[in-house]
Image (spheres, rainbow, N blue to C red):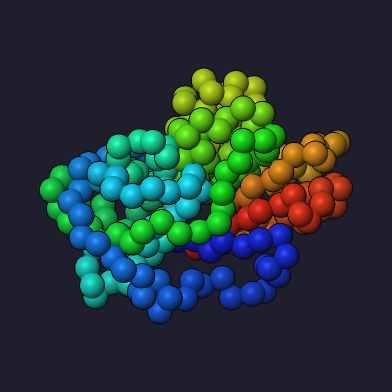
Amino acid sequence: MNILNISHHSFYPGENCQMNSATVQKKSLKKIPIIDNQEIAPGAFVLSFKRDFLFIPGQVLAVTTHENIAPRLYSIASGAQDEEIRLLYTLKPDGELTPELANLKTGDSLFVSGPTGKFFGIAGPSVWIAAGTGIAPFVSMWRSGLTKDKILIHGSRFLHSFYFEYEFKNALGDSFIRCCTKESGDGVFYGRVTQWLEQQPTLWPDKKYYICGSAEMVVEARDILIDKGISFDKILAEIYF
């Protein structure tokens, strides 16, 4: 998942959402060995390596497999106290980096930056809104003990793509809402996350809202929140592309 962090006031529809690759390449990258690289669902992987730095839940790392491949940013999917760093990604067969990532085995090398980003989780009441691998920063927040007074709304095309759903069910119970566009299932809303938001008569005006997903999803969700009375300063969003 390549990402772009935006605040409530800094993103406008039509902006160029491509990450500045020159900026990413300037980051200092460290060569580290891979501990594991598991396929957790069709085409979805969790790559792990030993943690040797501190980070704040919600931050990202620049990652590449070779100096000739531009680094991409991925959200950390580990708890702040975990011994390993985990990165969630999906294989893009025509992509430059993810096919290389998917071929990594235990002991292979990866080039990784230090943590960066300002998509920080908080201990207070919040609504987490994610699509696909946009769940990753919320996995980090959950594993860091930040699930109290949280509502998670996760959208996916397929039922098998609700990554970490059993853990979130146990942690959040009825506050974990799944939205699926291609398949139906028990307790799953059939449709997009934004459709679920639109159909709610009221939302939670006193909570903070975190959105992580595609540019289209983020903009649409943000606009729905605003239309339903959620103030700008309560919305923080991060785009992946």
Q: Position of residue 3 (x, y in %)?
A: 49, 61
In the picture, measured across the screen, residue 35 lies left or right of residue 85, that is left
Q: Quadrant of residue 84?
A: top left
Residue 90's x, y, as percent? 38, 51
- Say which residue appears at 51% left-offset and 30% top-offset: 145
Q: Is residue 55 above or below residue 22?
A: above
Q: Residue at x 76, y 54 (%)?
A: 233
Is residue 42 visible to us here? no
Tell me the residue at 49%/71% (across/down): 19
In this picture, is 230 found above or below 22?
Answer: above
Give the image location of residue 109, x and y in percent: 17, 56
Residue 45 left/right relative to 202? left
Image-quadrant location for residue 2: bottom left
Give whichever of 233, 75 is nearer the camera. Answer: 233
Q: Nearer the viewer, residue 123 or 220?
A: 123
**Above or below 30: residue 196:** above
